[in-house]
Image: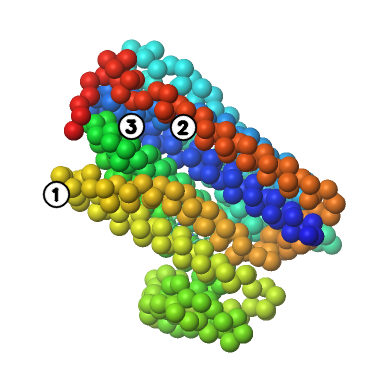
Amino acid sequence: MDTVLISRMMIGITLGFHIIFATLGVGIPFMILLAEWFGMIRKDPQYSLLARRWARGYSITVAVGVVTGTIIGLQLSLFFPGFMRIAGHVISLPLFLETFAFFFEAIFLGIYLYTWDRFKKPVTHLLLLFPVVIGSGLSAFFITTVNAFMNTPQGFTIRNGVILEIDPLKSMFNPATPTETTHVIASAYMTCAAVLAAISAFYILRGKRIDYYRKALRLTAGTTFVLTLATSIIGDLSGKFLANQQPEKLAAAEWLFHSESPADLLIGGVLDPVTQQVKYGIKIPGLLSFLAHDDFHSKVIGLNEFPRDLWPPLFVHYLFDLMVSVGIFSAAVTAFFVCIRYLISRLEWNRWLLRALLINGPLSMLAIEFGWTYAEIGRQPWILRGYMKVAEAATTSPQAGSMLVVFCALYLVLGILSSYILMRMASSNPVENEMEKRGVKWNAI
Ligand code: HEB
Ligand code: HEB
């Protein structure tokens, strides 16, 4: 294998692993905040216990997030020296700010975890969560501006291979920043709500029919519904951003080989690469025009307006479809749950509904992976769109291959270890015992 491919696999695997923990790191504090706030205003210690148990698990996932995040920083300079030569000058500001936001978050998280029941007023403990939520949100914001910069670089000029007139703020606030940062944060929040809903559904399916899990499921599934809508609305804006600024990425996702007005949205299908004909797909007339420009008749730019060697790989179509399908599935299941809970509450714990909520958790995490993979592969062959190709940025070191093996082994160990610890934490300390111990009343249903 050549070193470019190895470097790409390396950073891809690292990011794919980091993003699981980063997503949890961004969204869980918000869910803890919601639960503790509910506990306070409803004077219900079950919600406070929910916050406490989530926070305990969160401390494990944060630790893994920090390890993998630090590895990325290292790998970027090791495997993509060419990229860091340009990007390092221009985007060191947000990279530095991310570390700062992280420390801000970590300090308050530490205080929060050690001060349960220490304050006279419960609101003081709750207030400690705000810097945690803000810090993790800012981490995600800053680091995503770096990725946005790769999609729509600006704020510098290159003359004779030298980088001049660097304007860090202009590179941070580039055209991709608004939609990309908000879509990333909304989808991280959505995924955390969906994962926590899946855990409650899991215990209810296992026969733990107690009011604690009913409250947990109602809170998390209802929140997932709202956040799925937010993610989808922002996703629609991301589509409009692509149509205007990165049209080849949208065209590749929709197999739009020729500019069309109106353009149809394609779902599924099999492509014949020679004739560029699509078989078995479903076409929704005019919907791509609407996604691109809010107008069912507008013109959408096709791949014919780009030279063949600048086309992104065409399989991204499936990644885009899968991500959008998860969004639709999540919205449908959680909307159904919310209606049932208010209208026919005896069906609230229907096994099929619970199973759907159970798989929605892992599916949402997969959608994060699909979304990122689409965003990254869809930018190929560029690492900095219009300025530098991936092949020019990668290392030529012959050691790259053995490092790939070492790091994969490390992630495997980290992944297994952290899952094991989380499962042990849950099974060695069931919630009924903890409620007993803390004198929290609960009821079987
Ligand atoms: Fe991250 C962590 C880097 C992506 C989110 N990170 C981290 C770290 C690092 C990093 C270095 C450690 C800490 C500090 O700050 O120092 N990242 C990174 C890079 C990248 C990333 C380089 C790419 C390029 N992230 C990311 C994303 C996100 C994130 C995309 C979102 C969404 N991170 C994060 C968080 C954290 C981190 C949240 C913390 C931890 C936890 O919490 O978990
Ligand atoms: Fe998404 C990406 C759309 C859903 C996650 N997205 C993306 C894109 C688009 C979209 C267009 C690209 C952008 C760029 O590249 O810049 N989405 C969308 C839509 C929807 C969605 C329309 C509705 C359904 N997503 C979704 C979900 C999720 C997601 C559900 C999860 C959970 N995405 C995502 C991610 C990404 C994306 C992570 C990457 C980042 C960015 O933003 O880029």
Residue identifier under label 3 = 35
Q: Mark 3 or mark 1: which comes first in sequence?
A: 3
> Dot 1: few (<14), some (14–19), or many (≥20) neighbours within 10 Å?
few
Residue 417 occupies which quadrant of the picture? top right
Quarter the N terminus occupies: bottom right
Disc 3 to disc 1, C-alpha distance: 24 Å
Q: Nearer the viewer, mark 2 or mark 3?
A: 2
Which amino acid does the dot numbered 3 rest on?
Ala
285 shown above or below 207: below
Q: What is the CA distance from the residue labelled 1 to the residue labelled 2? A: 35 Å
Q: Is residue 75 left or right of residue 21?
A: right
Which disc is residue 343 wearing?
1
Instruction: Write down the residue under mark 2.
Output: 423
Q: How is the image coloured?
A: rainbow
Q: For the point 83% across and 60% down, which residue is it?
A: 161
- Residue 400 is situated, as x and y percent measured from the top left of the image, at 79, 50
Q: Is residue 92 visible?
A: no
Distance of label 2 from label 3 (alpha carbons): 21 Å
Q: From the image, state whether disc 3 or disc 1 is nearer to you.
A: 1
User: In the drawing, does residue 351 fall left or right of residue 176?
Assistant: left
Return the x and y of residue 172 as percentages of the image width and height: 60, 50
Kind of residue sitting beneath label 2: Met
Residue at disc 1, secondary structure:
helix
Which residue is depicted at the point 73% across and 46% down? Answer: 405
Q: Nearer the viewer, residue 362 or 352?
A: 352
Amino acid type, label 1: Leu
* Residue under the point 45% across and 22% down: 112
Q: Which of marks 2 and 1 precedes in the sequence?
A: 1
Secondary structure found at label 2: helix
| Residue 248, x across and y down, in percent | 58, 72
Kindly identify which numbered label has been placed on residue 7: none
- Decide if ligand 1 comes within 8 Å of the CB at mark 2: no
